[in-house]
Amino acid sequence: MEAKNNLRQLIQMFSPFDARELDKIIDCFEPRLIKKNAILLAEGEISKEFYFINRGCIRTYFITKQGHEKSRYLMIEPSIGTALTSFISQKPSFEFIDALEETELLAISHKDFYRLVDEIPQWKNFYLKIMEMAYSFQNRKIESLVTLSAKERYDQLIKENPKVVQRLSNKIIASYLDIKQETLSRLKSK
Amino acid sequence: MEAKNNLRQLIQMFSPFDARELDKIIDCFEPRLIKKNAILLAEGEISKEFYFINRGCIRTYFITKQGHEKSRYLMIEPSIGTALTSFISQKPSFEFIDALEETELLAISHKDFYRLVDEIPQWKNFYLKIMEMAYSFQNRKIESLVTLSAKERYDQLIKENPKVVQRLSNKIIASYLDIKQETLSRLKSK
DNA sequence: ATGATTTTTTGACTCAGGTCAATGTTTTTT
DNA sequence: AAAAAACATTGACCTGAGTCAAAAAATCAT
């Protein structure tokens, strides 16, 4: 299946895997087709799956007590991720996951994911690498929030992830940059 | 030595270790006494050590292009940490580390740290746990920055980490909360 | 102890980005 | 293809937090 081959490739980019072990890993992923706007994880639920996005786009976001959406992480194919904080702790998530487009993904359960961490040293290393990358990504996000103006954050995103800006609505981009839709609209016309 | 015993205790709180292996780990840490305001890592240098703070306080911070200090992580005894992004990638750090008080710490080199990751499975698990916690901490910080007002962030810090507020100067607290010293001063008199 | 440096407080003013509201424009549904 | 819903733009106005400056208080060094 095409999606599984793509996942195989992505995993091997991180570090070389024994073919047999890689098969065992890939076998744990199950394909799923997600409709646009479908919610994969609601606030308060426990994040029990980890995803590979083969086609489409999902995001994690949360809702402030003022009722505003804040997007944290946008996953456009090919990419991997989940609501990590809840996935790690197996406590209720403060984040949602939803699909921004019709999305074809592969999902592995928390149970299988951690079983593989114990059984396959290479997979533990892979997990460690994911955590390192996720950490660095978050750190970078804080740096941007704290040091850059709204305009500078927008310019940075265009420069570093033009695909995202082209493909997603202003509403989503604004909530990702932590600015209002109206502000983004004004920024663009400058 | 007292510091090493404290470190031993802290490590065992994460997960049980074989005594012999724990000795091997502890042996890799070397004690050091840091003067107040001393810089342990400057921007542009590579983070080559990981610390256990036995007495005192150090922090990581960076300087914006406007010349303002932003503190990211405050470590008061007993605690562990370093400039993680650079430590992980072994690329030049955008962060500084300095001592906010005279500090007694134990340091392990990057080389030893990762050698132990390869040699001692329990230590790899420990490292994984550190990464998970660091990630969740950063995630929480983003949530605070994005959803709370300056006053709310200050109140949250007092509630969750009163020790820090009592012990450190307003200047440091303000830079940690990402507000100006003047603003913090006004907040307090409300 | 005392002078020097650093930190904290207070006041007056500014401004980036938010809010609210109205009007276009695109997308979705039937 | 029309109606409805969601999204984007624009204008007028507001506000939380920053800036600049100066004085008061605390801390440090000799």
Image (tube, coloured by chain):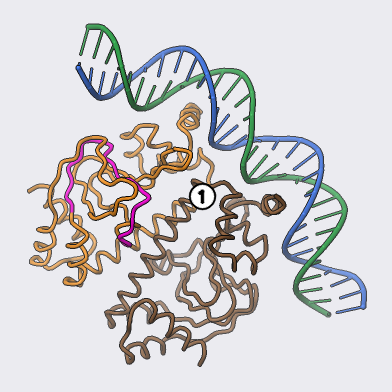
Chain colours: A orange, B brown, C blue, D green
Whether residue A98 is in magenta: the answer is: yes
Dot 1, how many residues are within 10 Å of its Cα: few (below 14), some (14-19), or many (20+)? Answer: some
Give the image quarter of residue A69.
top left
Give the image quarter of residue D6.
top left
Q: Picture coordinates of residue B32 (x, y %)? A: 55, 84
On screen, residue A171 versus residue A20, left or right, reads: right
Q: Is residue A2 visible?
A: yes
Q: Picture coordinates of residue A8 (x, y %)? A: 14, 56
The residue carrying mark 1 is B145
Position above or below: C6 against B125: above
Q: Is residue B43 visible?
A: no
Position above or below: B114 against B68: below
What span is in magenta? A88-107
Q: From the viewer's side, name the closer residue of D7 and A94.
A: A94
Check disc 1 and report its element: helix, strand or loop.
helix
Whether residue A2 is in magenta: the answer is: no
Q: Residue at x 64, y 75 (%)?
A: B101
